[in-house]
């Protein structure tokens, strides 16, 4: 799908399938083409990927027809501009808590390349744009995907106002951060966590915005999240999938050979 098609699918409630990539290996992109992912989420918030590496990854995935969406290290419009300039189709802004943060990022997602006072005027009143310029900006930015990480109590409290800004295509829960903000760290079956997920998803869908959670603990739970209204299925991370699958196969091999040692395969890379 194109960026525009992904945006429309997220907003209309159709299922969108994605996965997180943290490895810059040149081998990954060509093999992911046949998995059926609609886009890849490249994380630069919790990984040491630099700007040049992110650009190479984004350009490669784009060339193979897989839209790359990069999570920036902070909800900073300048960081969002950098990854779009590098070839990303969209960005994920971490730890969004206020509508003001969204308005600043809307300037990148919907009015790029406007800057300075011209941009501030457009954000305050889009009618300040000449018709020709407005059409140009809409066409230029129609593929830009804007996803907001919702992962705290203040974010939930302000969520209606955050979504009312109108620029966000989907919310994405960071389960680890959300569980910590709720005071139930890594207790993903706790009623407080389940209620928070349901609230976030319900509000997002009421605003015709996509809803999802980055999840790595199995398809069964993802079906539960989908039942609560989630339509962005952000499934696991490359390193997590490798560790889980390798651990299972090595434990099976150990059992067949009569070895008693068993590995746990614990991997928290996708829980951030």
Image (tube, rainbow, N blue to C red):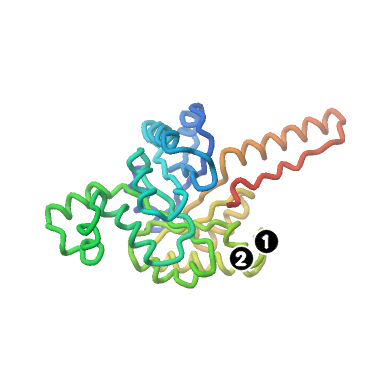
- In front: 149, or 206? 149
Q: Distance between the residues labelled 1 and 2?
A: 7 Å
Residue that label 1 marks: 187
Secondary structure of the residue carrying tag 1 is loop
Left or right: where 237 falls relative to 119: right
Residue that label 2 marks: 193
Q: Which quadrant is the N terminus positioned in?
A: top left
**Residue lying at 50% horizontally and 30% vertically, measured from the top left:** 31
Left or right: where 132 falls relative to 191: left
Q: Which tag, 1 or 2, sits closer to the chain's start?
A: 1
- In front: 38, or 96? 96
Q: In this view, does 85 lie above or below 114?
A: above
Determine which quarter of the picture holds residue 182.
bottom right
Task: Measuring from the top left, give residue 98's x and y in whole percent.
Answer: 42, 67
Question: Which residue is the extreme one toward the front?
Answer: 116
Left or right: where 217 falls relative to 106: right
Neighbourhood count class around disc 1 (C-alpha, 10 Å): few under 14, some 14–19, many 20 upward: some
Determine which quarter of the picture holds residue 223.
bottom right
Tell me whether the residue at label 1 lies in contact with that at label 2, contact meaning CB atoms closer than 8 angstroms. yes
Task: Measuring from the top left, give residue 164's x and y in whole percent.
Answer: 35, 68
**Mark number, residue 169:** none
Secondary structure of the residue carrying tag 2 is helix
- In front: 107, or 9? 107
């Amino acid at each position: 799908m194109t960026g525009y098609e992904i945006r429309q699918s997220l907003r209309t409630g159709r299922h969108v399938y994605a996965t997180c990539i943290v490895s810059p290996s040149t081998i990954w992109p060509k093999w992911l083409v046949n998995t059926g992912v609609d886009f890849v989420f490249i994380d630069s918030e919790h990984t040491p990927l630099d700007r040049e590496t992110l650009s190479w990854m984004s350009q490669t995935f784009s060339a193979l027809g897989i839209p790359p969406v990069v999570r920036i290290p902070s909800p900073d419009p300048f960081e969002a501009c950098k990854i779009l300039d590098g070839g990303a189709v969209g960005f994920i802004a971490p730890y969004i808590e206020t509508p003001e943060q969204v308005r600043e990022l809307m300037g990148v997602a919907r009015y790029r390349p406007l800057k300075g006072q011209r941009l501030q005027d457009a954000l305050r009143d889009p009618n300040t744009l000449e018709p020709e310029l407005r059409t140009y900006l809409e066409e230029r930015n129609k593929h830009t995907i804007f996803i907001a990480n919702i992962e705290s109590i203040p974010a939930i409290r302000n969520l209606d106002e955050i979504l009312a800004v109108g620029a966000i295509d989907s919310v994405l829960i960071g389960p680890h951060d959300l569980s910590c903000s709720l005071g139930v760290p890594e207790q993903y079956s706790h009623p407080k966590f389940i209620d928070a997920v349901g609230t976030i998803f319900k509000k997002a869908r009421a605003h015709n915005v996509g809803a999802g959670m980055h999840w790595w603990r199995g398809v069964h739970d993802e079906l539960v999240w989908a039942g609560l209204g989630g339509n962005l299925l952000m499934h696991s991370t490359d390193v997590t999938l490798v560790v889980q699958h390798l651990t299972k196969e090595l434990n099976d091999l150990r059992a067949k050979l009569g070895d008693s040692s068993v590995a746990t395969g614990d991997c928290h890379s996708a829980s951030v």
